[in-house]
Amino acid sequence: KEPIQDNRLPDAIVSDVRMPTSSKNGYQLVDEIRADPQFDHIPVVLLTAKAMTQDRIQGYKAGADAVLPKPFDAEELLSMLDNLIARSQQWVGTMKNSRSGENDQATPQSESMPASSSSSSSSSPFV
């Protein structure tokens, strides 16, 4: 395969689990994406005709951000992609900022997590 010749990367990748014209399937594609530092941050959505929970779990274990059974609603897929892309761009921006001279070792999660508390107050976003 030809390597990408320009610096543009996709905002997200949507793939079917079945790829009849390829020697691999969608799970293997996700494995390859997650193993490549150039692409590992890109959100991946797998589409599958298999409706069993175990099939979706296999997609998540491969590293997919979402697994959507077919037939699917186009609006649902677009809404899902909007959210995944927004979070990915936010995370990439945070990582760029932390690499550009800030030595605080903060991760995107630690910046957004509330301070730990022994009480379960209703102000927690996790309650």
Image (cartoon, helix red, strand yellow):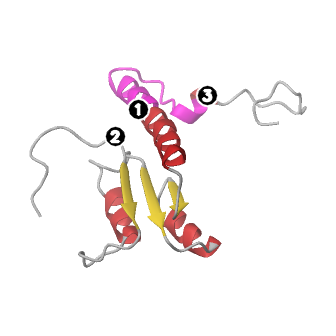
**From the image, which quarter does the C terminus lie in?**
top right
- Which residue lies at the image location 35% right of the left edge and 51% below the top edge? 13
Horizontal side of 104 relative to 28 (left or right) equals right
Magenta span = 89-110
Quarter residue 20 falls in: bottom left
* Residue type at the position of mark 3: Ser
Q: CA distance from mark 3 to mark 2?
A: 23 Å
Instruction: Determine contact: label 2, label 1, CB under 8 Å.
Output: yes
- Which residue lies at the image location 45% right of the left edge and 60% below the top edge? 46
Q: Nearer the viewer, residue 109 or 90?
A: 90
Residue 29, horizontal then vertical, whole percent: 33, 65
Residue 119, horizontal then vertical, whole percent: 90, 31
Label 2 or label 1, whichever lies nearer to me, is: 2
How crowded is the residue under tag 2: few (<14 C-alpha within 10 Å), some, or many (20+)? some
Number of numbered discs visible in the structure rendering: 3
- Which residue lies at the image location 16% right of the left edge and 38% below the top edge? 7
Using the image, tell me which numbered label, if any, was put on residue 112: 3
Q: Nearer the viewer, residue 38 or 60?
A: 60
Q: Which residue is mark 1?
A: 89
Residue 92, horizontal then vertical, whole percent: 39, 33
Q: CA distance from mark 1 to mark 3?
A: 15 Å
- Which residue lies at the image location 34% right of the left edge and 20% below the top edge? 101
Quarter residue 116 falls in: top right
Q: Which residue is mark 2?
A: 11
* Residue type at the position of mark 2: Asp
Counting residues from the start of the chain, the first of labels 3 and 2 encountered is 2
Secondary-structure class at tag 3 = helix
Secondary-structure class at tag 2 = loop
